[in-house]
Image: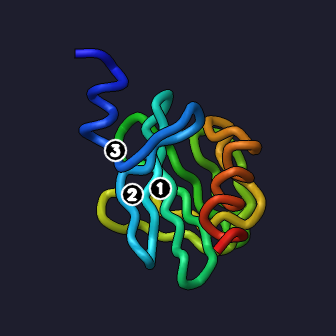
Amino acid sequence: MSCSKIKNYRYERFNEDFNVLSENENRVIITFDDNDLSVLVNKMENKLFILVPLTNMHSFEHHPDWILVDGERINSNLFWKECGNQVIEYQGDAPIAIKQDTIERIVNDFIKNR
């Protein structure tokens, strides 16, 4: 079975940048092929959250206005742990594993064009 056929079964839709795992009128859950990070888009509040799995593969250091994820500083003053993930509200910074143009495409597709 080809990779694209597997992706057709697994995701609602996908493109070269990201996979839409689940979508409804309130939220979208997005995954990526090249890392274990996910993005949650809250359509009702027009907010984007980065989900980093709480595994031994990732390290975290918490500060009042930023968080260090795997040695990378992410400026955000809203982050918490929930459902096995470190949840970080996107406030202009994203982990380098998620390209900035991909974040911009997600914002345009699911927040700005609503």
Q: Which of marks 1 and 3 is nearer the N terminus?
A: 3
Of the numbered discs 3 and 2, the one sitting upstream in the chain is 3
CB atoms of marks 1 and 2 within 8 Å: yes
User: What is the total number of numbered labels drawn onto the structure image?
Assistant: 3
Label 2 sits on a secondary structure element that is strand
Q: In which quarter of the image is the N terminus?
A: top left
What residue do we see at 50% from left, 28% from top? 34
Q: Is residue 37 left or right of residue 99?
A: left
Q: Position of residue 23 (x, y in %)?
A: 40, 63
Left or right of 5 on screen, residue 14: right
Alpha carbon separation for disc pair 3 and 2 = 20 Å
Residue at screen point 57% across, 31% down: 16
Please indicate whether residue 29 sits to the left or right of residue 1 in the image.
Answer: right
| Amino acid on which disc 2 is placed | Asn
37, 57: nearer the viewer: 37
Going 30% across and 64% down the picture, which residue do you hit? 83
Which quadrant does the C terminus fall into?
Answer: bottom right
Q: Which colour scheme is used?
A: rainbow
Crowd class of label 2 (few under 14; some 14 to 19; many from 20; radius 10 Å): some
Where is residue 64 shown, x and y percent of the image?
A: 68, 72
Q: Residues within 10 Å of mark 3 (few under 14, many from 20)?
A: some
Which amino acid type is marked by label 3? Tyr
Q: Residue beneath label 1, please?
A: 51
Residue at left 31%, top 58%?
A: 84
Which disc number belongs to residue 11?
A: 3
Q: Distance between the residues labelled 1 and 3?
A: 18 Å
User: Residue 76 at what x, y percent from top left?
Assistant: 70, 66
Q: Which of marks 1 and 3 is in front?
A: 3
Q: In what element is the residue under mark 3?
A: loop
Which residue has dot 2 on it? 85
Please state which of residues 96 and 99 is positioned toward the viewer in this rendering: 99
Query: Looking at the image, which is closer to me, 22 or 100?
Result: 22
